[in-house]
Amino acid sequence: MSKTKKQKNRDVMKRVICLILALAMILTILLSTVIAMAAESETFWPSGISVGSQSAIVIEASTGTVLYEKNADEVHYPASITKILTGLVAVENSQMDEEVTFSRDAVAQSRGGTSSIARDVDEVMTMEQCLYGMMLESANECAYAIGEHVGGGDINVFLQMMNDKAKELGCTNTHFVNPNGLPSEDHYTSARDMALIGQAALNNETLAQIMATKTYQIPPTNKHTEITPLNNHHAMLNFYKTSKYLYDGCLGGKTGYTDAARNTLVTFAERDGMKLVCVVMCAEKPYHYEDTTNLFDYCFANFKVEDVSNLENLFSNQSEDSIGVLAENIDLIETKVTGNVVLPKTVDTSEVRVSVEPTKNEKDPSIVGRVIYTYGNRQVGVGDLMFTGAGEYNYPFYNIDEEKGGSGIAYYKLNFVFVIEIILAVILGIAVLFLLFKSIDRLISKAYRFRASHKRYQPKYKTIKRKKRRRGKRRR
């Protein structure tokens, strides 16, 4: 092998080793980043409880923070908890003193031994009375009559309103084909979706009051000469058939049962200023009540709610990547006092992280962003970002189109400390690679000399061996 070829092999070996080292450095950096992200996601969240219901979820009502979930996105038949959405759509699209007339189709919903208060064809009640009949006694004919009335006489119009409302609330696994929850293969929802519906219902003052009512009386109507007494069937709120499951702080809810759905239950409760929504589905009796009680006890014991206005220096420890370029003066930013965050009781609020999404509010131009509070990888609250500066384009969200809530102004800001750190890191990396290259060159040279000194000598030229002449026999 010639000297030139050996030198080429040495150069190739150097390049290969340098490439391997460079890749190793890159992998080390990536691994460090992954480890850091994993460490950040490893945050404490209480989880030491289990339930017998096939599907369950608990959320905090003001923030929507999920405190517990089990198969929350599984699709199930809802039975009569459907009526929560029926009531919500009705309250938002009618007045309580409107007169509702029961059609023949509405009255037919009470046949077959289903839940009913025995209304008659052409009977007239107010919307309020119908809502109490539906939510307390789970009267199916009341639910249907409400749907026909709000839908302008067409139940299908009302059903479309229900499904549209579900989508508006963020439901992704819900489709209703009747207003009362009677069995149908196309009538389904999930525990998570019902929690969103329940949250909206609890935040509606009129509907929340109806669901929290223990007893009610419907006065005589054009078809009934006597008062019709109503009792709330939710055993955690009202001592109707048993007092075993009464729960301190219960704000009502809705029960449900069919053979196909089994027991379903939506319940609201409040303690120490924290309101919770609990949903259990496909549960066997009496686990729907026992699971709900245990989940409430566990969540109230392990979680707390904090007003964001009490969080001092909320943005002071946040990175610019998370809150964006909030103008030049961070003091111009303030959060709405109505926002809440929900955390485990053992976690300090200093561990909350903040991110901002730009937005525009037509009713209040001072609201320029939506604040999202997170703990680890969980969203634990939301709020509004207020900008106290004046001027049409004085929004803090530069480099974002106006249609997306930004100012539309191009803005560039250099972080000189970060730039210097990058330059120093590059210089250090080059120095390290140079030293490694020199060290490798020395090692290769030493290895080559060592191999050459211990190699047995071989002549450069081929030794010509003299052939021996064969001696023949002498002739005589």
Image (tube, helix red, strand yellow):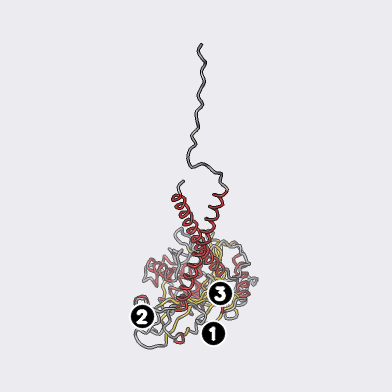
**Residue 472 or 461: which is nearer the viewer?**
472
3D distance between C-alphas at marks 3 and 2:
38 Å
Residue 394 vertical placement versus 351 (above, below) = below
- Mark closest to the chain's N terminus, 1 or 3: 3
Name the front one of labels 3 and 2.
2
User: Pointer 2: residues within 10 angstroms few (<14), some, or many (20+)?
Assistant: many
Q: Which residue is mark 3?
A: 276
Element type at mark 1: loop
Camera-side residue: 191 or 153? 191
Badge nearest the viewer, 1 or 3: 1
Q: Residue furthest top?
A: 476
Question: Disc 1, disc 3: CB below 8 Å?
Answer: no
Callout 3: SS: strand
CA distance for labels 2 and 1 = 28 Å
Residue at label 2?
Answer: 407
Label 1 – label 3 distance at C-alpha: 26 Å
- Judge from the rendering whether residue 392 lies leftward or rightward of residue 143; answer left or right: left
Residue 312 is tagged as: 1
Judged from the image, the secondary structure of the residue bearing numbered disc 2 is: loop
Checking the image for residue 204, the label placed there is: none
Which residue is at a point 54% across and 49% down the rendered structure image?
Answer: 452
Between 239 and 43, the one lying in front of the other is: 43
Tell me where residue 350 appears, x and y as whole percent. 56, 79
